[in-house]
C-alpha cells in the first residue's frame, strides 16, 4: 500500500522531535525544516507518494534533503536517519520532553550526566536528590518537575495518556486491522469508547475465527514500538507515542458480548450482570446465556450489544454514559437523554481562516468545505486585534466582512455569519470599541491570557464578557489543555447563572486537546438552563471533522439537541440569536 500523506507527516513530526533532542535546541534549523515539511505534506492536495524527489523539493516548505528522506520512505518503507535517531533516543526520553520545564538541553544533560532515559529514572533521581545536585538545576526547577510529575501522573506505573494522543492511535489501528482477510469487525472499547479524557490503555477488539492474522498485522505496524506480551487471544504493545494497546481477538459470534464487557465501565458491567442474574442468566465476555451447567448453555444474546441490552429489558445505552452514574436507572424509567449525533449539528460557530496568523486555509476553502459537509451556516471568527501574534485589525475585519457577504451571495448554498474571537482581558474588557463590536453577526469571547489569576478575578472577567451585549458565546470556558495545563479557576455558580440569564451560549470546544467546557460544567449548565453551542474551532479545513468529538463530549454530559443552539434550523437559529443580542 502506498504511504499516505498522514503517515509521512507523522514521521516528519517524529524526526523533528528526535532532532530537537539530538541537537538540544528546539529552534535548530533542522528541527524547523522538519516541522515546515510536515505542514507542507499535510496541506498537499494530492498523494505525496506520487511525487518524485525533484517535484517534492519544489513544494514550498520541503528542502532537497527532506525530499530525499520522503522518497526513501515511499520507496523502501523506512528512513535510515529516523531509525538511527530512534535507536539513539528511546521513547522514554521523548516522554521527558513532555515535562514542563524540561527542554531538549536538560533532557540531554540528564542522559549524559545521570544516565536518565525515562520518567521512572527521573522520579528516582528526584527522590534521591541527584537532580538537585546537577549544575544549573535550581530549587525552583526541581520543585516544578516534582509537581509536574505528580499532577500529570507521569510516572510509568500509572501513566495515562490524554485522549488527544490515544484516539488517533486507536483509529489508525482499527483502520489497519479492518482490511485483513477473515476479520469481520473491529472496534476500540474501554475508556476510550466511553470518551474519557485520559486513557490508561486502548482496548481493541477484532472479530475473527483466527487470532494470528490480526496479531501479526498489529506487530508489523511501524508505530508499534515494543511488545509487552502476546498470548493466544490477547496481545499488548506500546506505540511510539507511548500508548499501550491491548488487542483481543474474539469469535464473531461473541463480538457484541465482548464489546460490552471490554467497554465497561466495570461498575456498569456489574449492574448489567446483576440484571442477568436476576433473570436466572449469566453475562460474561462471551455471551448472555441461560445458566445451565457446562459450556453449552443456551445463548440468549451475544453477537450484538443492542440485543443483550434488549434481553435485559434496557434500551442500548450510549458508551459515553456507561459509568453507573444513574444511566441504568434512567434507562429503566425512560429517562435517558435523547442521543445526540453529529448529523444534529446544522452550523459551526467558531472557525478561523488564514487571516488569523494561526489559521491555515483561505476563507473560500473553509466555506467550501463547510458546505461540502452539509452545514447550513458557518461563522467566521478570526482572532481579534488584542491577540499579539495573530490578531486582526479593524480594517482587516472590515475587508473580510465585505468578502464574506460577497461569497455568501456567490455561493448561495450556505449562510455566513461574520464574527470574531475576542480576547477577554484580565479586567473583562474586550477588543475594538463598543460600536464596532455591535456590527458583528456573532462574537465568541475567550480567555487567552492571565491563566494564573485567582478565582475572584477570573470569575469577574468571564461574567463581564458573558454580560456584554454583543457577545454571543464564551469560547473554551476554562482554557484547559488536557494533560498540559488545568483550566482557570471559576465560580461556576456565578458564571452559569449569568449565562442562563443573558442567553449567552457556553461553547463545547471540540478540539480533543481541549474538550472545554468540561463534562461536569456542562451538566451543571443543563441544570441551570444554559444554552450551548458545539464548535470545532477549526484552524484548517480538516478540523471541521472534529465536530464529532464535541458531540461525544455533549453525550457524556447527557446534553440533548434541544439545549444546543447550532442544532437549530437557520431560521430558528436566527430568531434565537436576535433574542440573545436584544436581551
Ligand atoms: P483505562 O484503560 O484505565 O483507561 O480504563 P478501562 O475502562 O479501559 O479499563 P481496562 O482497560 O482495565 O479494561 C477495559 C474494560 O474491561 C473495563 O472498562 C471493564 C472491563 N473489565 C476489566 N476488568 C474487569 C473486571 O474485573 N470485571 C468486569 N466486570 N469488567 C472488567
Ligand atoms: Ca483501557
Ligand atoms: Ca486494557
Ligand atoms: Zn479559536
Image: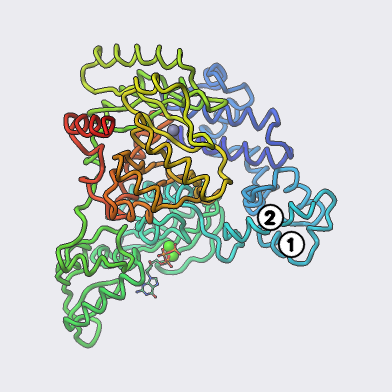
Tally of numbered discs = 2
Check disc 1 and report its element: helix, strand or loop: helix
Residue 513 seen in render = no
**Marks 1 and 2, how far apart in space?**
9 Å
Q: Nearer the viewer, residue 168 or 335?
A: 335
Q: Residues within 10 Å of mark 2 (few under 14, many from 20)?
A: some
The colour mode here is rainbow
Ligand 1 picture quarter: bottom left
The front one of 24 and 526 is: 526
Residue most toward the bottom?
293
Task: Name the side, left or right, on which 442 lies relative to 136.
Answer: left
Q: Residues within 10 Å of mark 1 (few under 14, many from 20)?
A: some
Rendered residue at 55%/30% (across/down): 70
Across and down, in percent, residue 465 comes to 42, 36
Q: Residue at x 31, y 33 (%)?
A: 348
- Residue 169 is situated, as x and y percent measured from the top left of the image, at 45, 49
Q: Which residue is mark 2?
A: 145
Going by the image, does 321 lie left or right of 10?
A: left
Quarter of the rendering occupied by the C terminus = top left
Q: Which residue shows up at 45% across the image and 12% down it?
A: 395
**Helix, strand or loop for disc 2:** helix
Q: Is residue 448 above or below residue 124?
A: above
Circles 1, 2 touching at the beta carbon (< 8 Å): yes
Q: Compared with residue 113, is residue 210 higher up or lower down, i.e. above or below?
A: below
At which x and y percent is residue 393? 49, 17
Q: In terms of depth relative to the viewer, which is nearer, 80 or 185?
A: 185
Percent x, y of residue 53: 55, 22
Residue at the spot of label 1: 126
Locate the N terminus by quadrant.
top left
Is 300 left, or right, of 341 in this rendering?
left
Amino acid at each position: 500500500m502506498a504511504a499516505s500523506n498522514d503517515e509521512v507527516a507523522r514521521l516528519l513530526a517524529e524526526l523533528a522531535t528526535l532532532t530537537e533532542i539530538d541537537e538540544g535546541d528546539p529552534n535548530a534549523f533542522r528541527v524547523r525544516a522538519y516541522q515546515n515539511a510536515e505542514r507542507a505534506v499535510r496541506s498537499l492536495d494530492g498523494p505525496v507518494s506520487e511525487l518524485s524527489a525533484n517535484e517534492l523539493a519544489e513544494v514550498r516548505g520541503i528542502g532537497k534533503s527532506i525530499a530525499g528522506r520522503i522518497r526513501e520512505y515511499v520507496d523502501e518503507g523506512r528512513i535510515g536517519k529516523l531509525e538511527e535517531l530512534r535507536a539513539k533516543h528511546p521513547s522514554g526520553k521523548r516522554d521527558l520532553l513532555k515535562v514542563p520545564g524540561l527542554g531538549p538541553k536538560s533532557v540531554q544533560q540528564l542522559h549524559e550526566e545521570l544516565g536518565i532515559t525515562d520518567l521512572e529514572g527521573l522520579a528516582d533521581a528526584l527522590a534521591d536528590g541527584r537532580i538537585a545536585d546537577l549544575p544549573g538545576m535550581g530549587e525552583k526547577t526541581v520543585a516544578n518537575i516534582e509537581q509536574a510529575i505528580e499532577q500529570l501522573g507521569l510516572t510509568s506505573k500509572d501513566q495515562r495518556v490524554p485522549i488527544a494522543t490515544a484516539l488517533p492511535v486507536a483509529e489508525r489501528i482499527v483502520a489497519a486491522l479492518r482490511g485483513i482477510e477473515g476479520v469481520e469487525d473491529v472496534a476500540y472499547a474501554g475508556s476510550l469508547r466511553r470518551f474519557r479524557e485520559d486513557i490508561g490503555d486502548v482496548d481493541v477488539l477484532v472479530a475473527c475465527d483466527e487470532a494470528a492474522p490480526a496479531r501479526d498485522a498489529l506487530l508489523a505496524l511501524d508505530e508499534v514500538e515494543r511488545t509487552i506480551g502476546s498470548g493466544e487471544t490477547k496481545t499488548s504493545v506500546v506505540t511510539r507515542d507511548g500508548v499501550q494497546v491491548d488487542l483481543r481477538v474474539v469469535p464473531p459470534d461473541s463480538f457484541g458480548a465482548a464489546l460490552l464487557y471490554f467497554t465497561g465501565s466495570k461498575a456498569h458491567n456489574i449492574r448489567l450482570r446483576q440484571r442477568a442474574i436476576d433473570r436466572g442468566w449469566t453475562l460474561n465476555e462471551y455471551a448472555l446465556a441461560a445458566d445451565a451447567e457446562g459450556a453449552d448453555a443456551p445463548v440468549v444474546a451475544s453477537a450484538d450489544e443492542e440485543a443483550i441490552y434488549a434481553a435485559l429489558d434496557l434500551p442500548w445505552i450510549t458508551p459515553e454514559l456507561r459509568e453507573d452514574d444513574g444511566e441504568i436507572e434512567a434507562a429503566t424509567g425512560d429517562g435517558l437523554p435523547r442521543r445526540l449525533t453529529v448529523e444534529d449539528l446544522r452550523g459551526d460557530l467558531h472557525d478561523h481562516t488564514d487571516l488569523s496568523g494561526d489559521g491555515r486555509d483561505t476563507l473560500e476553502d473553509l466555506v467550501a468545505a463547510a458546505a461540502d459537509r452539509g452545514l447550513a451556516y458557518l461563522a467566521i471568527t478570526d482572532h481579534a486585534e488584542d491577540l499579539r501574534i495573530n490578531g486582526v485589525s479593524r480594517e482587516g475585519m472590515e475587508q473580510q466582512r465585505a468578502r464574506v457577504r460577497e461569497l455568501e451571495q456567490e455561493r448561495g448554498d450556505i449562510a455566513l455569519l461574520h464574527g470574531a474571537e475576542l480576547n477577554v482581558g484580565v479586567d473583562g474588557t474586550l477588543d475594538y470599541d463598543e460600536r464596532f463590536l455591535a456590527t458583528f453577526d456573532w462574537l465568541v469571547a475567550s480567555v487567552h491570557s492571565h491563566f494564573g489569576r485567582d478565582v475572584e478575578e477570573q470569575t469577574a472577567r468571564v461574567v463581564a464578557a458573558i454580560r456584554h451585549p454583543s457577545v454571543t458565546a464564551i469560547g473554551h470556558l476554562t482554557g484547559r489543555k488536557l494533560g498540559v495545563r488545568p483550566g482557570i479557576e471559576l465560580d461556576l455558580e456565578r458564571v452559569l447563572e449569568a449565562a442562563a440569564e443573558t442567553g449567552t451560549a457556553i461553547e463545547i470546544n471540540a478540539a480533543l486537546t481541549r474538550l472545554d467546557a468540561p463534562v461536569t460544567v456542562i451538566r451543571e449548565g443543563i441544570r441551570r438552563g444554559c444554552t450551548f453551542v458545539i464548535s470545532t474551532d477549526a484552524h484548517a479545513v480538516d478540523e471541521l471533522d472534529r465536530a464529532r468529538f464535541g458531540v461525544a463530549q455533549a453525550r457524556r454530559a447527557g446534553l440533548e439537541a434541544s439545549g444546543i443552539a447550532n442544532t437549530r434550523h437557520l431560521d430558528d437559529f436566527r430568531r434565537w440569536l436576535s433574542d440573545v443580542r436584544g436581551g
